[in-house]
Amino acid sequence: MKKSILLIAFAILSLTVSAQKNAEKAANETCDCINKANVPDDISNEDWQKILTDCLGQPLLTYYEKICKENKIAADQTQESYEAVGTKIGAKLVENCPKFMKMAMRAEENKTAGTATKTEEEVGKEGTATGVIKSLDKKDFYYVTIENSLGSKETFMWLRFFKGSTSFENNPLAQIGKKVTINYRELRCFSPEMGDYVIKKEITEITFVD
């Protein structure tokens, strides 16, 4: 019995290490490419995005199916699946590729210094949206997607406690199909996949609409 448990534990550990190795391999190949790139001190955000896209492209294609399989991601060639795989690779780049972070920060500094960016009033602005909950996607956090009366969809990030969150904590999937009004604030977050800052809408309150 003890031997069987040890064999099972070893098998699980081997699968975990394998999953990490493929993401690490893709990240290492991407990092090698970034290290060889001629990156000027005044690199623009657009040029950095091009370098990142060129360096990530081949490793992403090479390891796409393996990383999907190991992380139970549907290998359906959709944008969502590529983003999920890219996030796994990006996380390893953040951990193991100093030049990746250095260049991302430098490009962001140059972007802030040389181009018009959102003001502090725009980043952090608050808003509301009303619609029917279409999905709750469990990733690094829950993402709540609603569809309004015009058929447009918006996605909001459940980052921390908010007023009205109790129903979602108890049974989040049971809320799909319900009409709600969502209060949100914008957050500026760093995306390892994009190598840049992106705007997310954080939920601050949800009210059910009768």
Image (spheres, rainbow, N blue to C red):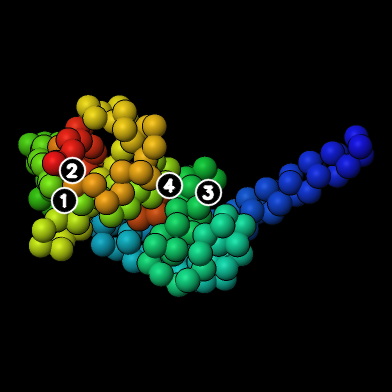
Front of the two marks 1 and 4 = 1
The mark that comes first in sequence, 3 or 1, is 3
The mark that comes first in sequence, 1 or 2, is 1
Q: Which residue is mark 4?
A: 139
Q: Which residue is mark 1?
A: 131
How far from the left and from the top, in percent, is residue 158?
Answer: 31, 38
Q: Is residue 18 left or right of residue 76?
A: right
The mark that comes first in sequence, 1 or 4, is 1
How far from the left and from the top, in percent, is residue 96?
Answer: 54, 45
The residue that appears at 24% across and 38% down in the rendered structure is 202
Front of the two marks 4 and 2 = 2
Front of the two marks 3 and 1 = 1
The residues tagged by marks 4 and 2 sit, at their Cα atoms, a distance apart of 22 Å
Disc 4 packing (10 Å; few <14; some 14–19; many ≥20): few
Q: What element does badge 4 sit on?
A: loop
Q: Which residue is mark 2?
A: 180
Q: Which residue is mark 3?
A: 92
The residues tagged by marks 1 and 2 sit, at their Cα atoms, a distance apart of 6 Å
